[in-house]
Image (cartoon, helix red, strand yellow):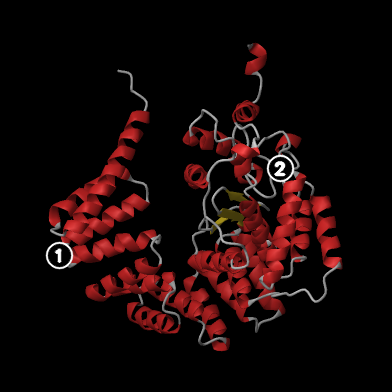
Amino acid sequence: MRLFKKIPAVLMVIFVLNSLLLYTPTMAITIAEEEELSREFMKVLFDRFNLVKDPFIINYINAIGQSILKEVPSQPFSYKFYVIDSDVYNAFATPAGHIFIYRGLIEAMETEDELAGILGHEIAHVQCRHISDKIDRSSKINIATLAGLAAGVFLGISGFETAGQAVTIGSMAAAQSLVLAYSREDEIQADKIGLENLTRSGYDGTALMTTLDKIRSKRWFDNIPNYLATHPAAEDRIAYIDSWSQNKNDLPSKGVTEGFKKAHTRLLALYGDQSKAMGYFKTALRQNPDDAMASYGYGLILARSGLRKEAVVHFQAALEQNPLDSALLGELGRIYFLDGRLSDAHNILRSSIGLYEDDPETLFYLGRTQMELGKLAEAVSTFNKLIESHFDYEQAYYFLGESYGKLGNLSDAHYYLGLYYEKRRDPRNTVFHLEKAFENTDDPDRKREIEGLLKETRKNLKEIQGNQPVRKR
């Protein structure tokens, strides 16, 4: 027993998983079970990781992912792509099509082909159901407990809590002693299928080799024991991709697209190390004062540092070269709003929306500006438009509720505030506002919807209260 206690907690979970998740391909979990397992994984992921929620970046990465998926046979899942706000060089996929890539890995990339290569590889892992096929659906343990145990190993426990040491479920993750780990065969198969999908999508698959080399060079896992090391068979994979490319002529390539440049710039300026970003964009502008993207990035990092007046100068410099760039106009309008220049903000933001009417950040700050100017009906219209196309934009629900409240519409005010707190996973405030919305509405459909939300939220609230420790008197 004393010897048992000395075993590290991470190994304890490995032993549990090994006993529960015996590899029996003929008994692989069903699609419905995989989706249920994925939901439980996602709960743990969202609790453990900070995600980049920048709409431009997320929309851009999802657009690349969806363009690759057009070349993939019909899938039973709706794929979604996320960016983890950490400087780790890694990426991974959960069951049921949720694909995560770390900010640090994207920052290290130089072309859209490299980004597509990683996403295509992860898509191939889900397509092949490499994780799911290893899970025995006859296990007696329930899905929620299984997800918690597995995610505990994969996402970092007992001394592996830091982002740089997080253990992940990824295409790059292959702890050989874990039943859920990818084998070398899994990795090569994902590369093979991924490369075929990438080529059909118009991307240069050999860029994956470049990214793998960067991951190998980074070697962020040097201090992690071998049984937890990620990125298996990197040399084998690089050799395979190199051999594959020898038989290909005139491979397609998208290179450095405008979307890649802008997403890359925003990641560096808004989410990377502030001092490094400041130095990077200063140097870029010193080398090329006419570089509009460098002016844009420098403006972003200046605004992030609270130097908004200086930021305006650089946004205006970038706009001189790209006067119809809606993103630049949106950033300038946001700064005008924050500086209290409401009339200027209103005009600039409306111009930006005229060029690109579906930008969520611009719509959000236009709605905020309209609220401050007392244009409440316009604000309601703007926030409604925002959540119709971007239903997960949390803050829009809050200010939509506030706008309705100022207009005296208590039913809609409490309803949208309730939805805001529900998205924030705050069951107490969710229940409070939805109960008020229920009291103030005569719409039978709205009442039924609220009843369903309240039932689920009260259940969650009871679970939270039941898990709270009892205080001793």
Circle 2 packing at 10 Å, graded few (<14), some (14-19), many (20+), is many
Tell me, yes or no, whether the two marked residues, 1 and 2, touch with CB atoms within 8 Å: no
Which dot, 1 or 2, sits closer to the camera?
2
Q: Secondary structure at mark 1?
A: loop
Quarter containing the N terminus: top right
Placement of 204 over or under 122, stated as above or below: below
Placement of 305 over or under 472, stated as above or below: below
- Is residue 85 visible in the rendered image? The answer is no
Residue 51 versus residue 151: which sits nearer the camera? Answer: 151
Instruction: Give the labeled residue for mark 1.
Output: 408
Q: Residue at x 27, y 53 (%)?
A: 418
Q: Is residue 185 left or right of residue 364?
A: right
Q: Residue at x 53, y 64 (%)?
A: 58
Q: Is residue 280 left or right of residue 357?
A: right
Instruction: Give the labeled residue for mark 2.
Output: 174
Q: Residue at x 50, y 42 (%)?
A: 33
Residue 41 versus residue 28: which sits nearer the camera? Answer: 28
What is the quadrant of residue 395 in the picture? Answer: bottom left
Residue type indicated by callout 2: Ala
The CA distance from mark 1 to mark 2 is 57 Å
Residue type indicated by callout 1: Gly
Q: Secondary structure at mark 2?
A: loop
- Location of residue 407 in the rendering, given as x and y in whole percent from the top left corner: 17, 68
Q: Residue at x 28, y 48 (%)?
A: 453
Residue 103 versus residue 372: which sits nearer the camera? Answer: 103
- Location of residue 197 in the rendering, given as x and y in whole percent from the top left corner: 68, 65
Q: Is residue 23 left or right of residue 63?
A: right
